[in-house]
Image (spheres, helix red, strand yellow):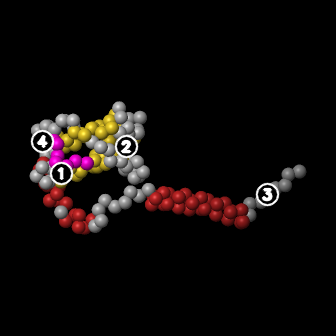
Amino acid sequence: MTRERKLTGWHVLAIFGGGFGIIIAVNLALAWNAVATFPGLEVKNGYIASQTFDDRRAAQEALGWTVDAQAGDGLVTLEITDAKGYPVRPEAFSAKIGRSTSVREDRTPEFDFDGARYVAEDDLGPGYWTVWVDATAHDGTRFEQRLDLHVEG
């Protein structure tokens, strides 16, 4: 003899409450993770930075520099070339490498110029990386560029 169970209003309320509870918990977890891993602001005041953007971009483009980033065999190479394809050695140079989604793996390797490119020992893990290049030309023009770098796994 089996007893027949009824689906009552309380059961339906518990099912809907549990379903919405799961949705709310997942949304809260995602929101918390987004805020906890936010790398921060690029500039303190976007309006102020925008006032000189066109002038800085024009000066940087006038240099005619291009940057190519490669990684493999425990090395990261950054090749800066001028409009004619010749290697460029800026007056000042620095580069930061990290993931675009988190600051946890950000690093600033020591790059050395080997006569043709900048080389640093850094064994990047597989996946997508971002390279932020900051250089100053001999005439004082600042060169900033963000590069996407994919390392095969």
- Foreground mark, 1 or 4? 1
- Foreground mark, 2 or 1? 1
**Residues tagged 4 and 2 counted as in contact (Cβ below 8 A):** no
Q: Which mark is residue 128?
A: 2
**Residues tagged 2 and 3 counted as in contact (Cβ below 8 A):** no
Q: Which residue is mark 1?
A: 136
Q: Which mark is residue 90?
A: none
**Residues tagged 2 and 1 counted as in contact (Cβ below 8 A):** no
Q: How far apart are the alpha carbons under marks 3 and 1? A: 77 Å
Label located before the other in sequence (3 or 1): 3
Label located before the other in sequence (1 or 4): 4
Q: Position of residue 110 (x, y in %)?
A: 30, 43
Q: Position of residue 105 (x, y in %)?
A: 40, 48
Q: How far apart are the alpha carbons under marks 2 and 1? A: 26 Å
Q: Position of residue 32 (x, y in %)?
A: 49, 60
Q: Residues within 10 Å of mark 4 (few under 14, many from 20)?
A: few
